[in-house]
Image (tube, rainbow, N blue to C red):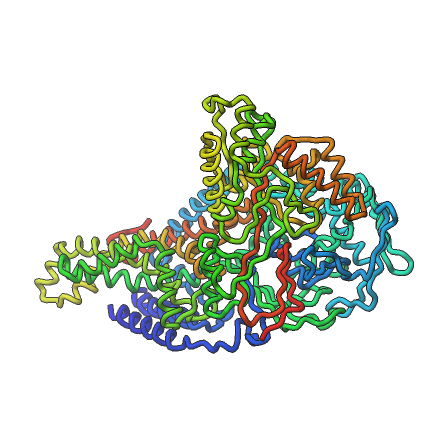
Amino acid sequence: MKNVGAFFTIFWFTLVFALGGCTKKNLKTDFDLLVSETLRINLQQEPPSLDWNKSTDLTSSVITNNIMEGLVDYNLEDPELGLSPGLALEWKADPLGKVWTFKLRSGVVWSDGVKFEAQQVVDGWERLLNPATASEYAYFLYAIKNAKKFHNGELKNFSEVGVQVLPDGNLRVELEYSMSYFPSLLTHHSTFPIRKDLIVKFGDRWTEANHMVVLGPYKLKIWNHDQAIVMERNEFYYGEKAKIKYVLCYMINELTTAINLFDSGKLDLQNGLPTREIKTWRQRKEYVEHGLLTIFYYGFNIKKAPFNNLKVRQAFASAIDRKQITDMLAGGQTPLLSWVPPGMMGYNSQVGIKFNPDNARRLLDEAGFKDRSLFPKVKLAFNTNEDQQRIAENIQAQIKKNLSIEMELVNEEWKVYLTHLRNDTPSIYRLGWTADYPDPDNFMNLMAGFSDNNHTGWKDKAFDELITQAAGTLDKNKRLKLYDKAQKILTEEATPVIPLYSGVSQSLVAPRVKGLVHNGLSRFVFKKVRLE
Amino acid sequence: MDSLSKILSPIVFFVWVVLLVLNFLDHDLGASVWYGVLVLNCFYFLFFALYQNMVGYILKRLMGSLLTIWVIASVTFLLLRVLPGGPFDSEKALPDEVKAAIEAKYHLNDPLPKQYLTYLKGLLHGDLGESYKYLGRSITDIVKESFPASIQLGVFSLVLAYLLGIPIGVIAARFHNRWVDHILMAFAIGSVSVPSFLVAPILILVFCFWLQWLEPALWQGPSYYILPTLVLGTRSAAVIARLTRASVLEVIRSDFIRTGRAKGLSETKILFKHVLRNSLIPVLTFSGPLVAGIITGSFVVEQIFAIPGIGKHMVLSVSNRDYPLILGTTLLFSVLLVACNLIVDLLYAVVDPRIKVP
């Protein structure tokens, strides 16, 4: 068997040879891009879809928000994320907030040189609402007259839906009801214009790099599935051209792996850090954190004893010290007593049940549980996740200490958990919400009696009326007052939920990256970012 | 016939070694070269099968395999529908109209038997459907795009595993119960019992951050390949080493070896020519599942080194309830496993002339 010996020699020779050839020149990144003109970021996963009518996740939106723009854009530098003109230069509503007119920017062209027109917006909305598209975000435009009917198939003709191109090339939208925040919806990728001709031509593959045509500051250059995406500056972009020529997006799922690459100088931006070691990361000079428009809360099933008793719910709410939880998480989260998160219009730190163990015990006594042994055994449910485990254990301990009540913790895999939440809501469950658009209605709507996201079983007519009224109110101060009232009902008077804290985005940003604005929606737009 | 086989075997062997080395050094060979080699290999196997009179046996086994795969496909299909939670369940509840539109599009509202028939029909046409998670991407595309990296990593690791494992096993047996044996076996037990998520970070720390020789993650060239190959390969090497050692120890005591010694053959010749060949049966048996398992990707190693392989899809498709992708990856794994076991059964005849396969 001389072969074995020969094979051995070849193998070791190869290994040594390969090791020798490993001195990599660090001037270039993968795909032969110059490091000096490439921003390297981590998307964490393959974007499920870049079809902006259909995609539903944050990963995909990092790409779509850089290659596309909507009629309306955010002013990312504004802490409250006010609106700014996008493809529409200006917009106005009739006094009721029911008919909106959008004046479109002229001279805008797609990345293949074709002119941008209002009809392409209408095409996008028609596609979004077409049941055959099966977009999860179709309901975003339900406010438009007849849109819901078109989506559920009652209406076949899209021309009956309340959107039309005016003779001057502008867009007129008629709503079913007053809606003060309608322009906010148009910042969302699901409502962006499309090129119907290309979708007809390429079918589902219109989002591949060699087919895709866009309006944003970047265009798609390479999409190697499961590996990387390269975006290149779009020279046809109507506004100020992007400062960095390329954005290279990796899809590295494991956080520590991404950090290893960051530390070896191969990554410029890593959003999302391991929460366990967050104290270490916070001390690094590359660390950046920013409050998110995300809330985390616990809900009660108010149909089941003992939480059908308001006093019991209030007792639990005042027995939990939110600060203890955020201190434990130690990543810059903000304790939350009210419903709307800080950084959004409507946030009011004065609303909500404050931590007061004495009051909690008194309330529980009044509820008829002076003898704690009478209190039924309750289960606290959460989805299997390290952070959620820590939070649940903390709350279990706090309730035991402050109310002398034992709770059992139950965790389930995410989709199993969601199924239970919908079909057989646990006594106490944990959930969160991230803003789709920075308007309080997006949060208040959640707990409405008609909302599918309200698993508590709680329904309150006064609350529903308040938020419907607020949604149609154009005057900001009047709206705020209505939301204060509604939040008081939700968190203090009825207490079907206990808000815990609002989320935070944690990133490592390489020192050479300048001008990156962090915001509450975790919306990363790179057109103004520079490299030094 | 016999002499032809003696000429052909080294050629096929040599071609594979060259390909492997070129691939490791990241030379793009192009699909045609790979197809060429595969065809060459098929011919070789065919020739071999004819020569050994095994065509009937192979056909019978293939029929059996089809049955196995049909059972796996059906059971997986049913189990998925029993699993709570659907592909489009998310934190944000969807209005009923939206849910209805989605279910209609993916035929999830059809009665179960109809769904099953559609799925089987697609399968017969080689169409595995479209992913529910990665919209618009067919399962075939996903496998095509992610499988090559897994095969690459798998083959590198396998080569390393055999090249390390078999010699270590033989040497340990040769010096049975002496210090060499103890050290080698301690190494073997160590690499089996220390999990890869512990070994990998240590290797990364040493080779990427202290010595700065290799890359900590991604999959783009020789300097990226070495660490994952080491992590994945040494574990299997350890198992192979232990199997080889045990089996060599058994063979070494048999009569024909004593005869060889009496005839005055050198110890090395006895060990490598007579003992090794006869000790390979347990290693071969283990190789079927090993090859299938390693080639279809190791989730942990692929995660740690951010390798764009198929291991990730095998695991994440389940938590995403991406039915077509789960079915696709399960079937891929079953087909490979069945194929590897068939090849192993055929190889028995090569390694041990006493075994007649049919």
The quadrant in which the N terminus of chain A is found is: bottom left
Horizontal and vertical percent for residue B49?
A: 37, 57
In the displayed structure, does residue B200 sit left or right of residue A351? Answer: left
Q: How many marks?
A: 0
Q: Is residue A409 above or below residue B209?
A: above
Picture quadrant where residue A415 is located: top right
Q: Is residue B10 visible?
A: yes
Residue depicted at x 49% and y 72%? B28
Q: Using the image as rendered, state which of residue B26 and residue B254 is in the foreground.
A: B26
Task: Report if residue A227 is visible in the image.
Answer: no
Which image quadrant is residue B261 in?
bottom left
- Return the residue nearer the eye: A185 or A162: A185
Q: Quadrant of residue A228?
A: bottom right
Residue A143 in picture, x, y percent from top left: 78, 44
Give the quadrant of the C terminus of chain A.
bottom right
From this view, report whether residue B123 is shown above or below residue B43.
above
In the picture, measured across the screen, residue A357 lies left or right of residue A232, that is left
How far from the left and from the top, in percent, is residue B17? 37, 69
In the image, residue B241 above or below residue A153: below
**Front-most of residues A16 and A299:** A299
Left or right of residue A413, residue B99 in this image: right
Going 27% across and 68% down the picture, which residue do you hit?
A4
Percent from the top left, x then y, of residue B70?
Answer: 49, 43
Q: Residue furthest front?
A: A358
Question: Which residue is at a point 85% across and 46% down the rendered structure image?
Answer: A98
Residue situated furthest right in the rendering: A167
